[in-house]
Amino acid sequence: MTERSNRCIEEYRTQTRRTAAPDFAAKCLDRLGLADRYLAIESAIGPVYVAWNPVGVSAVRQASDSEAFERWFRKRFARRALPATGEAPIVESVRRALAGESVPELAIDLRDCTPFEADVLRKAREIGRGHARPYAWLAREINRPRAVRAVGSALANNPVPLLIPCHRVVRSDYSSGEYVFGSDVKRKLLEREGLDLPAITDLVRHGYHYLGQPDDGCFCLPTCGNVIHDEHLVRFHSVDEAIAQGLEPCTTCRPMAA
C-alpha cells in the first residue's frame, strides 16, 4: 500500500472517529423506555424527589431543587435521572404510599444494593405503620443475628426511605436513632404513626422490655402496634417472665427475635 493510501485511510479514520456525547447513553435508554425519570411528590416530611424506571422506584430524596437531586442521583447510581415528561402509572401508587397507605404492589428497584442490603430492606418493608422494631430484631429475622451494626449500615444506604420504612427500625433502648432525614424527623414520623416513644423509652429505662395482654393471651414488644394500652396491660422484664404467666409471643412483632 502506498504512502498516499495510508495517509488517506488515516485521514478517513480521523474524520469518522467520534466521541459519544456525555448524555448519549441516557438518551439511548430514554428512547428504549429504560431511563430513570423523576418527579417531586408531596410526603409526610414535605416534597421529596422520587425517581423510577421500568423495574420500579429507584430513589427517594430531599433536595433543594431538581439540579441538586440530579447531582445526587448521578453520584449515588452512576447514571442520570431525567425529569418526567408526564405521570407514569407508578406515580399514583407512590403518592398513595407517601400518604401513608400500604401499597404492597408498589415495585422497588434494589438492583444497586448488595444482596445483604436488599435482604435487610425487604424485611424492613414488612414493618407496618404504627410499629417499630430494634436493629437486633431485624438482624435475627434475616438469620444474621451478629450483623446488627451491618443492618444499621444497610438501612442508612436505603435508596427509597419512606417507601421502605427504615425509620421504623430503632435502637435497642427504643430511642429513635439516626436517619437519613435526621433523627428529629424519624421521631416525628414514628409519633405521627401512633408510637408514644417517650413512654416506651421510659418503660425500657425501668427494665421492662415486653408488654403482656392477658385477654389476648400474648406478649409483645413495646413498639408493637397491636398493643392496647389499658389497665390490663402487664409489664415484663424478660421473655421467661411472660411465658411463666402462660402468654404466647405475638405473631406480629415476634418478640423472641429481639
Image (spheres, rainbow, N blue to C red):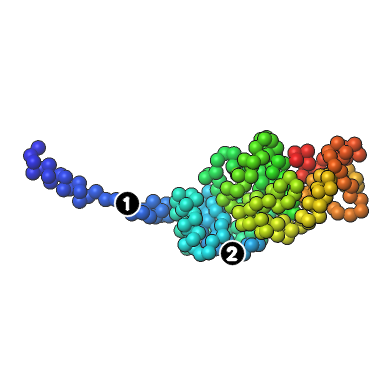
Q: Which amino acid does label 1 sit on?
A: Ala
Mark 2 highlights which residue? 47
Residue 200 picture location, percent across and down:
80, 52
- Point 49% across, 55% down: residue: 72
- Point 47% across, 58% down: residue: 70
- In this rendered view, identify the residue nearer to me: 238 or 60: 238
Q: Can residue 155 be seen in this view?
A: yes
- Point 84% across, 39% down: residue: 238
Mark 1 highlights which residue? 20
Mark closest to the chain's N terminus, 1 or 2: 1
Task: Decide if residue 79 is on the left or right side of residue 56.
Answer: left
- In this rendered view, identify the residue nearer to me: 251 or 203: 203
Helix, strand or loop for disc 1:
loop
- In this rendered view, identify the residue nearer to me: 167 or 36: 167
Mark 2: few, some, or many residues within 10 Å (few <14, many ≥20)?
some
Q: Which amino acid does label 2 sit on?
A: Pro
Residue 93 picture location, percent across and down:
61, 57
- Point 46% across, 53% down: residue: 74
Residue 254 picture location, percent across and down:
77, 41
Point out the image quarter for the C terminus. top right
